[in-house]
Amino acid sequence: MLSANNPLEQARLKLEVALSELTQHKIALAFSGGVDSSLLLVLLGLRLKQGHLPQGLVAFTVSTTMHPQHELKEAQDLAKSFNIELEVLKLDELPVIAYNPVNRCYLCKHALMTRLKERAAELGCSVVIDGTNADDLKQYRPGLQALKELGIKSPLAQAGITKEQVRGMLAQLGLNIAHKPSSPCLATRFPYGTELKPEAMAAVGKAEEQLHALGFTNVRVRAYPEARLIRLELDAEALSRAVEYRSLILPILQSMEGYDHYTLDLEGFASGSMDKAILAQTK
């Protein structure tokens, strides 16, 4: 039973209240397999098992060219472990965002959620929710406007739940996914205005998977096709180890066609580093 004895439990109570407001509806969950939507899946799954979600729950994962394919398998495995129905929707969003416009996130999110919302309505779901958290509201997230326009609910953000709190709750529930690094769409690895090619994004995704296998947690392979340059971002504390692993890392990056120069960013991993120029213009 939950109590309000510490900040994490207080946050969990707020989230449970936000979720309880939705339980009279059949819920459609936009489930990416990341930590945020995974927490919602688990908590709603527990409610479903206890009979506290009488109208039911359907989780939707959208398979696109923009996300690493291993994410799909992980999402399917987690949903299956909680006996939750998971439907995989196919979407080719590249025609809409072919040259990586600065409003890419809005265009992509709008297309994705429109497709999901239409299918959810066919299955009788009267509310659609996603895993946007309170931290997302403080960053450059054009996709938030699409969520607002389409009436998508974000219970984590509504309850003021941060990414750190999401991980803490998952850890309390004994789930290893609590330590899973964030993995935004592969278009974020390329500068705005760059033509997004499926093979180039797949190469980035494969390289990042191989770097994860070497023990690096937060990894971003930032690709600059016009400059034929790869910029590697790792956690600051992993930079010295990256130098030690040079003979293993370099062949991974060199296997990507179209690049001649490979750099290690001394500032370290920074989520949304491709947005610096845009954020500077808004100040």
Image: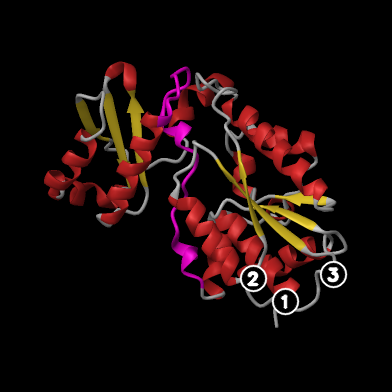
> Which residue is labeled 1 in the image?
49
Pointer 2 local density, CA inside 10 Å: few below 14, some 14–19, many at least 20: few
Residue 269 in the image: x percent, y percent?
A: 36, 43
Q: Residue at x 22, y 35 (%)?
A: 255
Q: Which residue is drawn at 34% across and 29% down?
A: 223
Residue 21 in the image: x percent, y percent?
A: 84, 61
Q: Distance between the residues labelled 2 and 1?
A: 9 Å
Magenta: main secondary structure: loop
Disc 1 element? helix
Mark number, residue 83: 2
Mark 2 residue type: Asn
> Residue 193 in magenta?
yes
> Which residue is labeled 3 in the image?
54
Q: Distance between the residues labelled 3 and 2?
A: 15 Å
Q: Do the residues labelled 2 and 1 touch (CB within 8 Å)?
A: yes
Considering only vertical position in the picture, is 86 above or below 277? Answer: below
Q: Do the residues labelled 3 and 2 touch (CB within 8 Å)?
A: no
Q: Magenta part of the protein: which range? A: 175-198
Disc 2 element? loop
